[in-house]
Amino acid sequence: MATLQIHDMPEDVYEALAERAQMEHRSVEEQAIADLASVAELETHRTRRAAIEWLRQAEPLVRDEDAFDPVQLVREDRDR
C-alpha cells in the first residue's frame, strides 16, 4: 500500500480534516483517505458526464431512414 506524507499543511486545513474525522468516527488518516477517494470519484463522474454530453452532441452514425429495424434483424438471424 502506498504512503503519503504532507509537509507544511496549513493548520486550518488540518483542523477541518480532524473535525470531519471526529464527526465520522475516523482517524485523521482514514478521513484523509476518504476525502481523497471522494475527489477521485468526483473526477471520474465529471469525466463520465463530459463523455455523455459529447456523445449527445455528436452527429449520429446512422440516419433515421437508414436505421436498422431490430425486429427485422432478429427475423433474418432466425432464418439463417
Image (spheres, grey):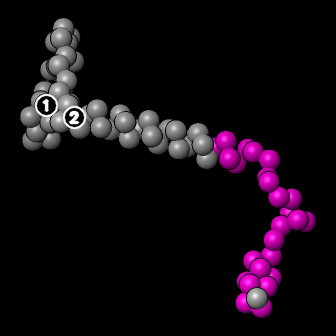
Q: Where does the image place residue 9, in percent across and percent down from the top left?
A: 19, 12
Q: Can residue 23 be seen in this view?
A: no
Amino acid type, residue under disc 1 in the picture: Glu
Q: In this view of the protein, which residue sits in the foreground, 18 or 74? A: 74
The local crowd at label 1, few if under 14, some if 14 to 19, many if 20 or more residues have their Cα within 10 Å, is few
**CB under 8 Å between discs 1 and 2:** yes
Q: Considering the numbered disc 2 on the image, is that residue within a helix, a strand or a loop?
A: helix
Tell me the residue at 81%/71% (across/down): 68
Query: Depth check: 35 or 70 in front?
Result: 70
Q: In this view, does 9 lie above or below 52?
A: above
Q: Quadrant of the C terminus?
A: bottom right
Taking the magenta stretch, the answer to whether it contains residue 45 is: no
Asked whether 75 or 52 is in front, the reply is 75
The residue singled out by tag 2 in the image is 33
Secondary structure predominantly adopted by residues drawn in magenta = helix
> At 52% across and 38% down in the image, what residue appears?
47
* Stretch in magenta: 53-79
Seen from this angle, which residue lies furthest bottom?
79
Please state the horizontal and vertical placement of residue 6, each as a whole percent of the image: 19, 16
Against 56, residue 5 (above or below) is above
Other-residue count near label 2 (Cα within 10 Å), few / some / many at <14 / 14–19 / ≥20 = few
Please say whether residue 73 is visible from this viewpoint. yes
- Give the residue at x 10% y 39%: 26
Residue on which the image places disc 1:
29
On the image, the x and y values in percent for residue 40 come to 37, 36
- Residue 3 in the image: state x and y as whole percent: 17, 27
Q: In which quarter of the image is residue 63?
A: bottom right
